Image (cartoon, rainbow, N blue to C red):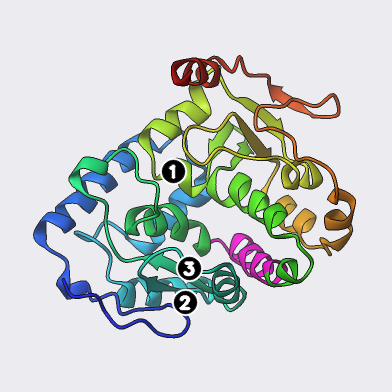
Amino acid sequence: MDRPAQNPDFTIPQNWEGYTSEEHARWNMLYERQAKLLPGRACDEFLAGLAALNLNEGGIPDFRRMNQKLHALTGWTVVAVPHLVPDEIFFEHLANRRFPAGRFIRGADQIDYIQEPDVFHDVFGHVPMLALPVFADHMQDYGKAGIRALRYDGLKMVARLYWYTVEFGLVRSPQGLRVYGSGIVSSRTETLFALESESPNRIAFNLPRVMNTDYRIDDFQETYFVLESFDALRAESFQDFLPLFKAAQGKAPLVPGHVDRTDSVIHRGTQDYARSKAQAAE
């Protein structure tokens, strides 16, 4: 497929008609696998968004059709991009209720893991939560905060907030812990690890703690942070981050598996998985 022309904001046409039957079949396989796994594991809000957007109409969703439903619910749209976009472009899109999504889908040899986000991770993983008004508003607030963070050397701290919530967050429910982060819900193996493994820590969400904790980008997380609710996430995150940026200056961030004496620990992990991977790498 020819590489489409890129706009100044890094958007490109999705060119839905250009997807092959094999690519649509790959989406269907990934969708069906996660759809069977997530009930009882993903939060009700994610599952409701998935149903409302009807992302299993047959193959990779056409953004034009999907956006009609999403925009009617929360005013958001999804825009296609060729790859990860620069931070300032990403934040600008979010601040204007546009979510940038990769248009390519992973290869048959990358079904269980792909480092660069593809259309399955971005659409299946992220977009259902954008159908929830409070989360949609939080994402716009986050985009505006990200723009400000670039001016005050706070990029790493807001990136950690995104990672431990939007990408790899857990939330309490009356039935127990549930996943909602896109990096979890779009991955069979991380869904099971995040909820059922004894290895990772599960710690109650605390904004300064999250923003000062490093994360893993190449493997399962050593710590997951747990929200009380999505309303609580927006309330705690809807503030001026500048004092937090200033307080962190000159201080080393916490390592991913750290448990602090001030943490509200839901489950203190064994870290057996992280230790075994570290030993294997020696």
Q: Position of residue 41 (x, y in %)?
A: 47, 34
Q: Residue at x 30, y 79 (%)?
A: 13
Above or below 181: residue 270? above
Disc 2: which residue: 72
Q: Position of residue 114 (x, y in %)?
A: 35, 45
85 left or right, relative to 187: right
Instruction: Determine the CA span between mark 1 and mark 3.
Output: 22 Å
Give the mark toward the camera: 2 or 3. Answer: 3
Q: Position of residue 27 (x, y in %)?
A: 23, 53
Amino acid type at image mark 3: Val
In this figure, what is the number of numbered marks?
A: 3
Above or below 102: residue 272? above
Q: Where's the N terminus, which quadrant? A: bottom left
Element at badge 3? Answer: loop
Crowd tier of the residue under label 2, counting other residues whose Cα lies within 10 Å: few below 14, some 14–19, many 20 or above: few
For the residues bearing labels 1 and 3, Cβ distance under 8 angstroms: no
Q: Residue at x 15, y 52 (%)?
A: 25
Amino acid type at image mark 2: Ala
Chain part drawn in magenta: 132-146
Tell me the chief SS of the magenta region.
helix
Disc 1: which residue: 185
79 left or right, relative to 136: left
Is tag 2's residue or tag 3's residue first in the polypeptide sequence?
2
Disc 3: which residue: 85
Instruction: Determine the CA span between mark 1 and mark 2.
Output: 24 Å
| View extreme (front): residue | 282
